[in-house]
Amino acid sequence: MQRYFIYLSYDGTRYHGWQVQPNGISVQGELQSCLSVLLRKPVEITGAGRTDAGVHARMMVAHFDVDDVFDETQLVYRLNRMLPRDIAVGRIEKVASDLHARFSATARTYYYFIHIGRDPFLRHYSLEMPYQLDFDKMSEAARQLLTVKDFGAFCKAGADVKTTLCDVTRAQWELMEDGDVKRWRFVITANRFLRNMVRAVVGTLIDVGRGKISIGEFRQIIASGSRSSAGESMPGHALFLWDIKY
């Protein structure tokens, strides 16, 4: 049995998330279906993570195991001919049998995009803010994430997780120059992420930027471990899984 890694990207707008859903289309489901047809046998794939409904991926990695010998380049070509246009496979490569798309990943990076002002061409992939934000304070608050390990305050209530501990190694706001419209992106890297974590972190940082809470109160929210203390979860359309390291 040979293990393969498949590298892909997708626009998550019309999907109910990465993971196969009983009553909705998923990226995993589309990919498994096409692979199974092309390899003429049921194929199950395991992803590096589980993006939520509407969330995009510049890079997603998944693995699958098969006995068959095939041309990886040709399979990529045939998959891209068969898959919906909002999913694109970049490459497929052989890997060691003990390499796992999810558990072997050492770091994942997410971007969350925000723009100040109205722009019809950004609205599908960036969150429009109708008011100004203090990004200096938001950046100072974001640095607090590097000093803690327990992110229970940003985990979706009722999520089935064994631990809420994460090692965040990067958390910052970056200005993106783009004409008259001010664009920002929140960049966060960690060894693992909890369900809904990035969107909840962004929502709470926006509360800091609006002056609704102080940086001290932001620290208190983290320490509380209570999701009800943190800010609103921001919409998924502006969130991208950007990179995965092994």
Image (tube, helix red, strand yellow):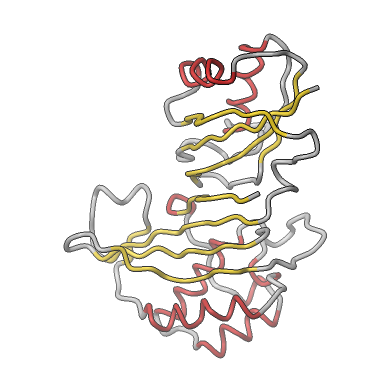
Q: Nearer the viewer, residue 39 or 55?
A: 39
Height in image: 94 above or below 207? above
**How many dots with numbers?**
0
Is residue 181 shown left or right of residue 90?
Answer: left
Nearest to the observer: residue 107 or residue 221:
107
Name the spot of residue 98 as percent of width and height, x first. 80, 38
Looking at the image, the residue that sits furthest to the left is: 180
Give how far across and how far down residue 26 sits, in percent: 59, 33
192 vs 1: above or below = below
Left or right: 112 as drawn, with respect to 216: left
Q: Residue 210: x percent and y percent?
A: 39, 80
Residue 220 placement: quadrant: bottom right
From this view, report whether residue 123 is shown above or below residue 200: above
- Which residue is farthest top? 40
Quadrant the N terminus occupies: top right
Q: Quadrant of residue 131 in the image?
A: bottom left
Placement of 133 over or under 162, stated as above or below = below
What residue lies at 45% left-to-right and 59% top-to-bottom?
112
From the top left corner, tell me how far across and down residue 69 is, in percent: 70, 13
* Residue under the image location 41 percent in, 79 percent down: 209
**Residue at the spot 55% in from the left edge and 44% down from the top edge:** 53
Identify which residue is drawn at 59% across, 49% down: 244
